[in-house]
Amino acid sequence: MKINKCNKIMSAIVYMYLTLPIFIFVVGWLKWYWAFLFGISILISTIISINSDNIEYEKIFLKQNISKIVIAIILIALWVTLSGIGGVMFQNSDHGARTAMYKALVDYDWPVISNKGNYGLIYYIGYWLPSAVIGKLFGFEIGYKFQMVWAAIGIFIVYLLICVLRKKVSIWPLIIVILFSGLDIVGSWPQGVIFKFTKHLEYWSAFFQYSSNTTQLFWVFNQAIPAWVATTLIVVGKNRKNILFILGSIMLASTFPFVGLIPFSLYFLFRKLKIQNFKEIFSLQNIVGVCVCGGITFLYLIGNISAGKVNTFENDIDTSIRMIMYVLFCIIEFGFYMMILWRNNKKNKFYYLLLIVLVACPLIRVGDAQDFCMRVSIPALFILMILCIEELPKLYKEKNKTLFVCLVICLSLGACTPMHEINRTIVQTVKAVSKGESPTERIWSIEEEILKGNNFSGPVNESLFYKYLAK
C-alpha cells in the first residue's frame, strides 16, 4: 500500500465516521430541497477535509506492527462486548432508554413523531443513525448488533490516532484508555463500598461526578465515542481548516461533549495564528460545520423539553458543605494528575486551559441531573488521559522515579473504578444466564416513556425544526 493511499484511506474512514450520522439525519429527516442542499454541502466538505488532512498514518501499518494492531482490535472488541452495547452482555439501566430510541428510529418513519402527532423525538440521536439504517434494511437485531461494530470502529480510530501522536504502536496506551479514571476509590473509601466489587464508585460525591472511560462506554456510549474521536483528531491534527467542521459534525451525537470541546477547538484554531493563515479558519468545511451541521442540529435540539434549565449551586444545600466537597472532588478526580503533569507542562498554555475547564465543569448544572458535569467534561478528561500517556514514557526516560511512580500509582488507583464496572457486568451476566434470563435491560415504551414530552422529546408545534425543516 502506497503511503499517500494509506493516509487517504484512513482519513476517509475517520471523517466518514464523524460525518455519516449528520449526513443521514439531513437526508432522512429534512424536506427534499433542504436535504439536497445541505447533504451536498456536507458531502463536499467531507471530501475536502479528507484531502486537506495532515495526519500521517502510514508508519502505523508497517509489517512489524500488525500483530500489535490485531491484539488491540481483540481488546477493543472485548471491551465493547462487556459494555452491553448490542445486548450480548449485562446492560446498565441507561440502556433501556437508548435501545428504545434506536427502536423508534427503526420502527417509525423519519422524522420520528408520536402516534398522536403532538411530540417528536428530540435528542442527541447521531450515534444510532447508521445502525438504524442497517436496522431498517436488514432487521432490528442486525442493526442492534451493528452498534457494536460502530463502537469498535470509533475506539479503533482513537487508538490509531494516539499511536500517530506517539509515533509508535504499543498496547499499553490502549490499556490506559480502558482503565483511565479519577481516584474515585479514595473518595469512596469512607463509604465502605470499595470492597463491594459491583458498586458504582463514582457516586462518592453527592454533588459532582466525572466518569471514567469505561463508565462512559458502559452507560453513555452514544455521546462518549464520537467525542473521543473528535477530541483526539483535533489534538493530533491541529488542522485549522477542519477543526470547526469536526466540532460541528459531533453536535448531533455528543451534544454535551460538543460544548466541552469548544474551548480546546478555539485554542487550536487561534494557536500561533498569523495573518496569512487567517483564511484557513474560514475554509468551506469550517463554514459548513458551523452553519449547516451546527445550525441544523441547534434548531433540532432546542425544541427538547429540558433544554433550557440552567442552574449553578442549589440554594437548598449548605453552600459551605458543597464547596468543601467541590474542592475534594477537584483534588481526587484530576488534581493529583495535574500536579504530576505540572513539571513538564508549566509553560504550556494548553495545560492551563485544561485545568480551567476541569475546574469549571462541576459549577454548572443543566436540567435536573449532573449531566453537564459528567458529559461536558468528556473531552477534557480524555485530553488529561492523553497527556498522562505522553508523560509516562517521558518521566521514565528522564529517570524521574518519584513522579513516574506517583503517576503509576494514580493510574492504578484510578483503574479500580473501571474494574468495578467490568466486574458488575460479568457478575450480572453470569447471574442472569444461570437463571435462564436475559442480561439486557428492559426496553422503554416508545410512546409512553420516550415520546411523551420528557427528556427525550418535545412538542412538534413549538419546534422551528419540525415546522420549517422536517419533512
Image (cartoon, rainbow, N blue to C red):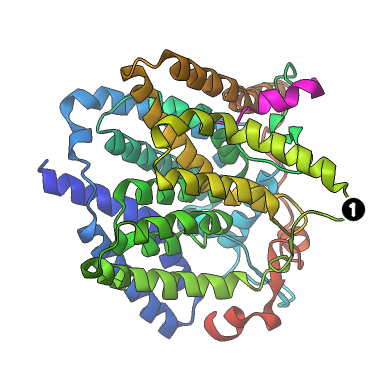
Q: Secondary structure at mark 1?
A: loop
Q: Which residue is mark 1?
A: 316
Q: Quadrant of the N terminus?
A: top left
Quick one: which residue is furthest to the front in this view?
A: 347
Magenta segment: does it hold 185? Answer: yes
Q: Nearer the viewer, residue 174 or 396?
A: 396
User: Based on the displayed image, in which of its 4 quarters is residue 189 positioned?
Assistant: top right
Coordinates of residue 40 in the picture (x, y in percent): 32, 75
Coordinates of residue 399 in the picture (x, y in percent): 35, 15
Within 10 Å of the Cα at label 1, are there few (<14), some (14-19), or many (20+) other Cα atoms? few
Coordinates of residue 89 in the picture (x, y in percent): 60, 31
Q: Nearer the viewer, residue 18 or 270?
A: 270
**What's under tag 1, amino acid-wise?**
Asp
Segment colored magenta: 181-193
Q: Residue at x 64, y 46 (%)?
A: 374
Q: Nearer the viewer, residue 225 or 355?
A: 355
Q: Is residue 298 left or right of residue 37?
A: right
User: Based on the displayed image, in which of its 4 quarters is residue 279 positioned?
Assistant: bottom left
Q: Residue at x 73, y 52 (%)?
A: 444
Overall secondary structure of the magenta section: helix
Magenta segment: does it hold 285? Answer: no
Residue 77 in view in this figure: no
Coordinates of residue 294 in the picture (x, y in percent): 48, 70
Q: Is residue 148 left or right of residue 336?
A: left
**Relative to 471, is 327 above or below?**
above
